[in-house]
Image: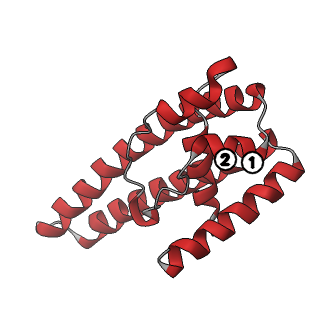
Amino acid sequence: MSWFRSSILFLLLSTGSGATLGAKIVQSQVPQVNYGSFSPTPVVNNREQLVKELNLTPRQVQQLKALRQKFQGQKQARNRLLTVAKQELSNLLASNAPTDKIRAQRDRVKILQQQLSDLKFDHMMSLKKILTSEQWAKLQKIKQQRAQNLNSGS
């Protein structure tokens, strides 16, 4: 399973806090976001159960929530720039623009895509730092099981 799915998992986990942690996690709504070629399927069916399985502390949940908010803002800004750059490339391709201008725009799109990929990777590394090594290992096992369930049609 990809590192990005683990990021999605934590994005979905990172809501709620305090004594009503479980209830808030279950009640919260995570917005659907277009992730381009990643197109992740929601990995978490029962957030409260996953919080319990990983034995996340309220502090970890708060850290995940703060990280999620930071990441979402950065990702949305980068996605807006990428969308504009792709549209400009499309417009250039549809016009009689010189090849060098089209190539330059394509290069800008590639740079923005790489920056977005780097941002996602950095986010995943930050998520890993919040968890203990045991929690991370358990999460990897859970993700693997859920991926198998998704692939088998269960």
Q: Amino acid at mark 1?
A: Glu
* 131 to 110, vertically: above or below: above
Nearer to the camera, 30 or 67: 30
Q: Amino acid at mark 2?
A: Leu
Residue placed furthest toward the bottom: 152
Nearer to the camera, 83 or 152: 152
Secondary structure found at label 1: helix
Left or right of residue 145: residue 90 = left
- Distance of mark 2 from mark 1, alpha carbons? 5 Å
Residue placed furthest toward the left: 95
Left or right of residue 134: residue 97 = left
Q: Give the quadrant of residue 65.
A: top right
Residue drawn at point x = 56 percent, y = 37 percent: 71
Residue drawn at point x = 51 percent, y = 72 percent: 150
Where residue 132 appears, x then y in whole percent? 86, 45
Q: Give the quadrant of residue 103.
A: bottom left
The residue that label 1 is drawn on is 53
Where residue 47 appears, x then y in whole percent? 59, 43
Nearer to the camera, 117 or 1: 1
Q: Give the quadrant of residue 12.
A: top right
Where residue 7 appears, x then y in whole percent? 61, 51
Where residue 124 appears, x then y in whole percent? 67, 50
Left or right of residue 60: residue 2 = left
Other residues around mark 1 within 10 Å, as few (<14) / some (14–19) / many (≥20): few
Secondary structure found at label 2: helix
Residue drawn at point x = 23 percent, y = 55 percent: 87
* 5 to 9, vertically: above or below: below
Other residues around mark 2 within 10 Å, as few (<14) / some (14–19) / many (≥20): some
Query: Which image quadrant: the N terminus?
Result: bottom right
The residue that label 2 is drawn on is 50
Circles 2 and 1 in contact, beta carbons < 8 Å: yes
